[in-house]
Image (cartoon, grey):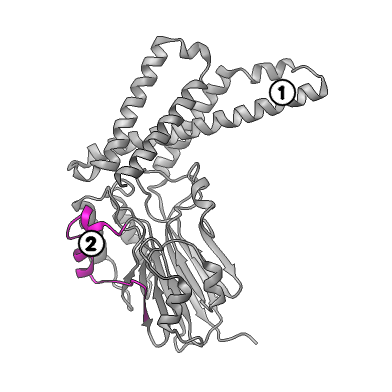
Amino acid sequence: MNSVAFLVAAIGFVLISVFVFMNYPLSWRKDKLFVTLLALWHLVGTVALTIVFTRFRYIAYENIRHEICRTATLFFVSTTLLAMFFLFRIIYTRTYQFILRRTGHGPKNTHRRISDRRYQTVIFILLSFGIALAGYFNIDFLKLNTYDVEVHAESAESGLRICLVSDIHAGSGCYEYTYDDLVEQINACNADVLLIGGDLFDETTAENDADNFVWVLQTIRQPKYGIYYVYGNHDGLMEDWVPGAKDAVLKAGVKVLADEMVTLGEDIQLIGCLDPKLRAEDFETLYARLQPDPDKPLIVLTHRPKHFREMAALGVDLVMAGHTHGFNIPHFFSTSLVNDMLDGLKTYGDMTAITSSGVGAWGFHYKWPAESEVVCIQLHFNGTEE
């Protein structure tokens, strides 16, 4: 995160914190002990957040990294959720009062008790920290999700098994013990080709995090058609964050596709797209430049799930993406509005789109209710339908 983005995010979070404080019961805000404890929690949480996004990769001890990341995650998620709950309460209260004025009825005694700010705030706090804790532990359960996809194009190949991993975010979003599970799930897929859908590294990645992923590449059962990788929006500055990381990944056998096309097996065409943040041309222009055979299977690996309708119109059979991290509360507000889909499988005419919720997460060690996943895709080539 650059300095300008960090400053904007910091100002926004300060405003959220002020909003949360002003919505605590007045009696609590007048209590010196409560205010002192709250100020201490916000101070510790703010320091932890700052370290995660500015100094995290320089911390050598894993236990310290875990504690800082845990504090930052619980602080950010719980505070954001509290702000949401308080906002919903304001909307509900004003709507209820409006209805009472219109109908001329007074509030019932049961509603007076339910509407007590103290009761509501206690419930909101318990829910916020409960969800934050659930997400903190849930992200560590890495699952293998499998899809069967019919491709209506002729191929000399009888089928193709793809393993897709994305958004590892080696660093604060992916602890070192996740890599053992990652090897296990990749091997369980037994794929012909391994595809990495971007955001392997980010600004929290340390040298040992990069080494952990190189170990994964050296340990897994090597796929028949190799390993391909497209850059995500956080990968563009990987050499600034972890010098030598890119070379280490390449030496481990990974091939980067930067708006390029390769052929898998006899005739399966794979296009790897640069992230729109790094790309100068749109997909239609890229397609015209690469000139894939329209009669042969065409699959696309990209980072962000965007422009899927344009890809379907051009005859793409399968597109795979990541970036969104799935449906996560409260983050889904920012991802669902700007992408074509959040996660899972969706069809666009004859094209199948699969978006992975990813292995890790950016900045915060948190994922709920989304799951951490490795995706296994079995392609079947049936020829053109009559």
Residues 154 and 148: in front is 154
Q: Residue furthest right?
A: 103
Does 257 lie within the magenta span?
yes
Mark 2 vs 1, N-terminal side? 1
Asked whether residue 209 is drawn in magenta, I would say: no
Residue 137 horizontal/vertical position (percent): 40, 42
Dot 2: within a 10 Å radius of its alpha carbon, few (fewer than 14), some, or many (20 or more) residues? Answer: some
- The spot of residue 64 in percent (x, y) is 23, 37
Q: In the rendered view of the protein, which quadrant contains the C terminus?
A: bottom right
Amino acid type, label 2: Val
- Disc number for residue 97: 1
Q: Please tell me which residue is depicted at 45% across the width and 39% down the height of the picture.
A: 134
Question: Relative to 204, does residue 344 appear above or below in the rendering?
Answer: below
Q: Is residue 10 left or right of residue 55?
A: right
- Disc 1 residue type (three-letter): Gln
What range of the chain is rendered magenta? 235-262
Q: Which mark is residue 214?
A: 2
Q: Nearer the viewer, residue 8 or 144?
A: 8
Where, by quadrant of the figure, is residue 150 drawn? bottom right
Q: Residue at x 29, y 55 (%)?
A: 201
